[in-house]
């Protein structure tokens, strides 16, 4: 028996019946997990694979190191400038104190001559007036030198000091302490504490 051919109406009814059948649903949790996984992957990739951010961080670190080095250099420069100023002040002070050293050395033979003249004229009544004049001249000379920072070294009876005394003779002397000055041939002088000329002395030694 031959089947009846389907009419267009029958085909439409069949399609409507298929559309009306329930379709399998996608679990809601699976959809949310997929969305979250996609978001997480994108965020992680944006944090890790960001060469511009890494470059900026490196530049910031370089700038911080440059600032630190600049501060260190500035501190060292300030310290060097302070030391240079202090040295200049010390040099100027030394120059001021010892500018007269050459002049003092030239004046000391005059003092020596006056002292020798007094020694040679002692006991001569006829030359008493001359002695007084020479004594006054010598005192004026020493006072002028003293005002300029010059001090006389006359170490008679003092212990021998090689820093300020020049021993020209060693003499046995039972009445004096060994290594003490028993005679001053020529007095010494200092200028503001600096030795200009040592005292020429004779030093006692044990008998």
Image: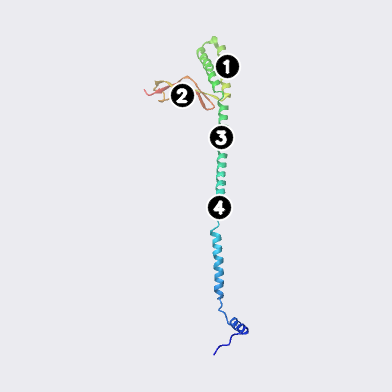
Q: Secondary structure at mark 4?
A: helix
Q: Find residue 106 and report its image quarter.
A: top right
Q: CA distance from mark 3 to mark 1?
A: 45 Å
120 and 1: which one is in front? 1
Tell which circle, 3 or 1, labels the residue nearer the N-terminal end: 3
Q: Is residue 68 above or below residue 12?
A: above
Tag 2 residue: 165
Q: Which mark is residue 55?
A: 4
Q: Find residue 45 and report its image quarter.
A: bottom right
- Residue 180 is situated, as x and y percent measured from the top left of the image, at 43, 25
Query: Of circles 2 and 1, which is in front?
Result: 2
Q: Which mark is residue 72?
A: none
Tell which circle, 2 or 1, labels the residue nearer the N-terminal end: 1
Tell which circle, 4 or 3, labels the residue nearer the N-terminal end: 4
Q: CA distance from mark 1 to mark 4?
A: 88 Å
Tell which circle, 2 or 4, labels the residue nearer the N-terminal end: 4
Tag 3 residue: 84
Q: CA distance from mark 2 to mark 3?
A: 36 Å
- Residue 37 is situated, as x and y percent measured from the top left of the image, at 54, 68
């Amino acid at each position: 028996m031959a089947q009846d051919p389907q009419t267009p109406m029958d085909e439409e009814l069949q399609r409507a019946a298929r559309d009306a059948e329930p379709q399998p649903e996608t679990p809601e949790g699976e959809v949310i997990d997929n969305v979250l996984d996609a978001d997480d992957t994108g965020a992680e990739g944006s944090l890790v694979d960001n060469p511009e951010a890494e470059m900026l961080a490196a530049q910031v670190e370089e700038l911080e190191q440059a600032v630190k080095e600049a501060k260190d250099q500035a501190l060292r420069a300030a310290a060097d400038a302070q030391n240079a100023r202090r040295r200049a002040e010390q040099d100027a002070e030394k120059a001021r104190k010892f500018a007269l050293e050459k002049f003092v050395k030239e004046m000391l033979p005059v003092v020596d001559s006056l002292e020798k003249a007094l020694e040679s004229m002692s006991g001569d009544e006829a030359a008493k007036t001359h002695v007084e004049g020479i004594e006054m001249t010598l005192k004026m000379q020493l006072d002028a030198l003293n005002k300029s920072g010059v001090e006389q070294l006359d170490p008679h009876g003092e212990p021998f000091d090689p820093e300020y005394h020049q021993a020209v003779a060693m003499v046995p002397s039972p009445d004096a302490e060994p290594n003490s000055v028993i005679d001053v041939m020529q007095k010494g002088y200092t200028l503001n504490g600096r030795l200009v000329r040592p005292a020429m002395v004779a030093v006692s030694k044990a008998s």
